[in-house]
Image: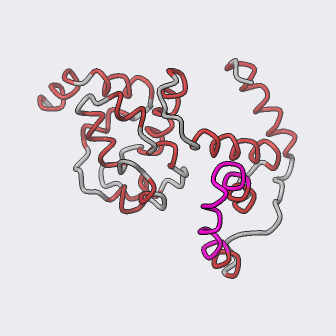
Amino acid sequence: MVGHTLELRGSPFLQEIIREVPGGERIVHCLQCGTCGGSCPNGADMEYTPRTILAMITANQRDKVLKANTMWFCVSCYSCVSRCPQKIPITDIMYGLKRISIREKAYQETDAPALAKTFTDLLDKYGRSFELGLASRYYLFNRPLAMLKMGPMGLSMFTRGRMSLTPTRIRNVDQLQAIIRKARELGGVS
């Protein structure tokens, strides 16, 4: 326990994450095994793997972490969390990093915030993600040439029944929309 206490004192950024993210103190238990990065479906698009981000947090590399694209490419699938032998809430840490980055406008000018906006727009309207709509809107408005590369994967997902051509709404979506409106009102977010 003494080693963990020293680590906590040594990194103000780690202390900040601990305050920002419930369970964030578990970062000190990271074995650097790489299971999180190996489990991540977007790992290849990330500037740093989740494992590297955790090490950078511990090493107090705040600016590099907040400017990285890693948290913006997290798709919140929780594969990393479910496979982590130390039960580190990696996805929640990624959300915490996004909040800090947005609050301080520390993120690089990338298209990641556009992806997040597209996702939340779909969630607001349907109550769930709509993969085809998310991918097509995001790529069409932000990276139209890259959209062509996604065609084979999209077709494969569709033929395997993993992607719908039309969105579906959850039941009682109006109740979810009321919750979202109230949360935005309380949080001062439009």
Q: Is residue 69 magenta?
A: no
Span highlighted in magenta in the image: 137-154
Residue most extreme to the front: 145
Q: Residue at x 81, y 53 (%)?
A: 170
Q: Position of residue 41 (x, y in %)?
A: 48, 62
Q: Residue at x 24, y 56 (%)?
A: 33
Q: Position of residue 67 (x, y in %)?
A: 42, 34
Q: Is 36 displayed left or right of 188 in the figure?
A: left
User: Along the line of sight, which residue is nearer the eye, 1 or 117?
Assistant: 117
Q: How many numbered dots are placed on residues in this image? A: 0
Q: Is 56 displayed left or right of 76 in the figure?
A: left
Q: Coloured how?
A: secondary structure
Image vertical order of residue 38 relative to residue 81, above or below: below
Q: Residue at x 31, y 41 (%)?
A: 54
Write down the quadrant of residue 39 in the picture. bottom left
Q: Position of residue 79 (x, y in %)?
A: 46, 58
Predominant secondary structure, magenta span: helix
**Screen quadrant of the N terminus:** top left
Image vertical order of residue 152 relative to residue 55, above or below: below
User: Along the line of sight, which residue is nearer the eye, 141 or 82?
Assistant: 141
Write down the quadrant of residue 37 in the picture. bottom left
Q: Is 136 displayed left or right of 21 in the figure?
A: right
User: Along the line of sight, which residue is nearer the eye, 44 or 51?
Assistant: 44
Q: Residue at x 84, y 45 (%)?
A: 173
**Screen quadrant of the C terminus:** top right
Q: Position of residue 32 (x, y in %)?
A: 23, 51
